[in-house]
Amino acid sequence: MIVLNLRRNDDFDFVKELQELRDILKKKNITIGIVESFEGDTHSVKVICDEKCYDEKVKNTLYLYISNILYNIILEQYRKKEMFDFLMENYFFLKQDEILEVEEIIMSVLKGDSTVNDDRMIYCINKVNSIIEKIKECLEENEEINIQGFITFRMKELRQGIEDVIEKVVEEYMVEKEYKEFVKLLKYFVDIQESRIDEINIYIQDGGGYIIKDKYGNDIFEEFIKELSECKVDTEANIEDIIISGLITNAPKSVIIHGKDKCNNKEFINTIINVFGERAYCCKGCSECKIVKTKI
């Protein structure tokens, strides 16, 4: 029986993908056939499945795979014809080389190649799945699909999902860019001044609290707060900002982080390591780590 009839012109070549799909399904004991025919400029590709093995589960699997193929076709069309202009128009503050860089990140996310796994990525994955589901619903409603017509009439609906992902990726890119510039500035401040202290130890407690000591075991956190007050800086800042400020002000020759795995804010640790470079390192376990219990 004919499951789907996909009609295309020379702009859309997905026969190779369908052949790969056939091999994948064969391993799942699902046999499909692919029949090609030509009528003028139109190339018709029929997907055929034996009625004996065709049921709702097979249908769902088949349509999901084909929806992914069509999704990638739509994605490439959007990239070729619309993405650069969309980025230029909506993110004019980006330099051209940044736009090209962002475009690569966007495509990586939209194609599911990104290895990042955070809230923003989960949002993007959900958006992509939503786009694919809409394509699948269209396939289920129509056994014959003209790819060009489908893109023309459905692109507005699908475009919104793609551009929602773009917005999230650019937002993340800008946050990362600002963070790198911030770290670069802090590193500059550390590099140009002489060290006021040889060693600062950061002890991270169960629950994420901090104790700050010099190499003699003196608690110096209050000195950090005093330095902020003298600089007329808001001392209501969160504890991690106070520690970062104290580290920058004192520019220690070494920063030792104890109990890294207990830290609730990994960005805080990464910032210290990025700013101080080889001066900063994590303790692998010492006697002091075991006896620190008091929270700041």
Image (cartoon, rainbow, N blue to C red):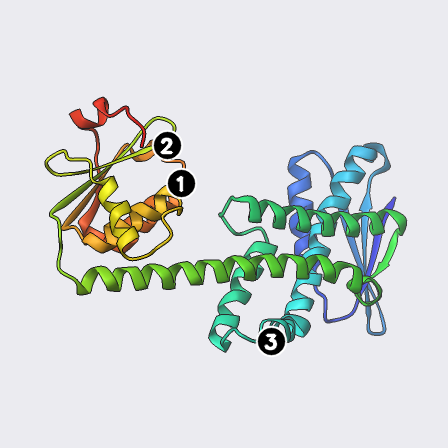
Q: Which residue lies under the disc numbered 3?
A: 88
Which residue is pictured at 79% across the width and 64% down the height? 156
Q: Are marks 2 and 3 in contact (CB under 8 Å)?
A: no
Q: Mark 2 and mark 3: span between their CA atoms?
A: 43 Å
Q: Are marks 2 and 1 in contact (CB under 8 Å)?
A: yes
Q: Identify the element where label 3 is drawn.
A: helix
Task: Give the residue type that dot 1 points to.
Answer: Asn
Which residue is pictured at 16% across the width and 47% down the height? 254
Q: In which quarter of the image is residue 10?
A: bottom right
Towards the viewer: 131 or 178: 178
Residue 50 higher or lower than 197, as above or below: above
Q: Which residue lies under the disc numbered 2?
A: 208
Which residue is pictured at 14% across the width and 44% down the height? 199
* Residue 173 picture location, percent across and down: 50, 61
Sequence order check, earlier mark of 3 and 1: 3
Q: Identify the element where label 1 is drawn.
A: loop
